[in-house]
Amino acid sequence: MIEIDALVVGGGPAGICAASTLAEKGLEVWLVDENDQLGGQLVKQTHKFFGSKEHYAGVRGIDIPQKVDLCKVKVLSNTSVLGCYKDGVYTLIIEEKTYIKVKPKGAVIATGAQEKFLPFEGNDLPGVYGAGAVQTLMNKEGILPGKKVLMIGAGNIGLIVSYQLLQAGVEVVAVIEGADRIGGYWVHSAKVARASVPILTNHTILKAVGKSEVEGAVIAKLNSNWEVEPNSEQTFEVDTICLSVGLAPINDLLWQRGCQMQYVKELGGYVPSRNKFLKTSVDNIYVAGDVSGIEEASSAMVEGKVAGLALAMDIKGENFEMEIEQAFRSLKWLREGETALNLRKGLEKIGVIEC
Ligand SMILES: Cc1cc2nc3c(=O)[nH]c(=O)nc-3n(C[C@H](O)[C@H](O)[C@H](O)COP(=O)(O)OP(=O)(O)OC[C@H]3O[C@@H](n4cnc5c(N)ncnc54)[C@H](O)[C@@H]3O)c2cc1C
């Protein structure tokens, strides 16, 4: 049994910021991630971030992890946290070989999110991908998923990945969206529209066509009750169908540990109940980033800082409230505007902010 001050599970933007903050406050921190490279979703985000300088505006997502100071953090890559038990013990497996037990004084769970899928005929054919998988293939491995793509979902991820496909020379035949409006930022939809890619709202996919791989896709129009309008089917000849229909928090460890969970549709599904310092119902377990509600990398980083500071206060008994207040102001700024309305509703439901 190894005893440490703090354990951070997940090396995405939330986890690296939490770990860096805890180390800066003089605590012995382990940062654990199951991948070979730190950054979580950032390792595939080749585009430049926007917003403010404080939130790495102008820096490519893939370059952000190197800008965070982790020199005092013990980083365990290729390591998965398998379990989290009532006595405060966490079980880890390193490189799929070495099994160890760790007992930290406190932990930040920053395990991120996984992609949601859609039920439709033929969705198990080779050629049907999640948008995250397409980004990994293209931006990390340098492999194109196909030549002609239909994108399902016009949120930020669907729009960004569509644009990245176009930049890589892939034809995007259309972006379809079930809702009556585009969910992503105007700046992303404008780039796709300028490339003459139609963005069809009120549309859904009915089936993937093909015997052993995707050869086409049938879509149809939806009415205001989300029912398929008769005779509205259209067929596209494509070799790839890319799904970008939302993310759901990876919350297994929190369920296992008995943290109180709440279903909040606007935050992506089951999320942990927590106070504004991101402390869960279980003492000394904090959360940050997408596991606490689907948002963005910028807010995940600020949440990581809040959770790190709050846990450091618990462990050291010192007061870092002024720094926390500053981070709160940053979060408020990031959560302003019409596009974050849904998110604010979700956070209000969980009792974190006033809408
Ligand atoms: C395809 C895609 C594109 C996106 N594009 C943008 C964008 O352009 N701009 C933007 O701001 N946001 C974007 N986002 C959202 C943004 O990437 C996320 O909000 C952000 O990465 C969340 O950070 P996180 O640290 O909470 O989780 P993640 O980045 O998901 O990191 C979590 C990490 O934890 C690891 N992990 C999980 N469970 C365990 C375990 N048990 N043991 C060890 N490790 C574990 C995961 O492997 C992962 O590395 C995108 C998301 C996706 C999926």
Image: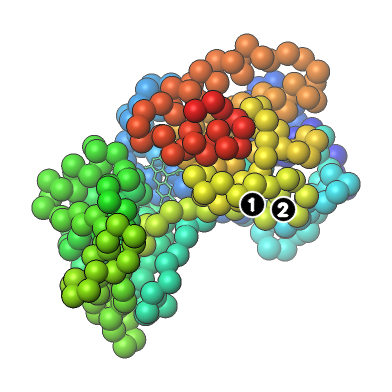
Separation of residues labelled 1 and 2 (CA atoms): 6 Å
Q: Are marks 1 and 2 in contact (CB under 8 Å)?
A: yes
Residue type at numbered disc 1: Asn
Q: Name above or below for residue 58 compared with residue 183.
A: above
Ligand 1 under 8 Å from disc 2 Cβ: no
In the image shown, does 329 or 95 lie closer to the viewer?
329
Q: Is residue 158 left or right of residue 103?
A: left
Mark drawn on residue 255? 2
Q: How does the figure colour the protein chain or chains?
A: rainbow
Residue 49 lies, in percent from the top left, at 35, 34
Residue extending furthest front? Answer: 225
Q: Name above or below for residue 54 compared with residue 6.
A: above
Return the residue at label 1.
251
Residue 347 lies, in percent from the top left, at 55, 35
* Residue plotted at (21% across, 57% down): 200
Residue 158 lies, in percent from the top left, at 32, 53
In the image shown, does 355 or 72 lie closer to the viewer?
355
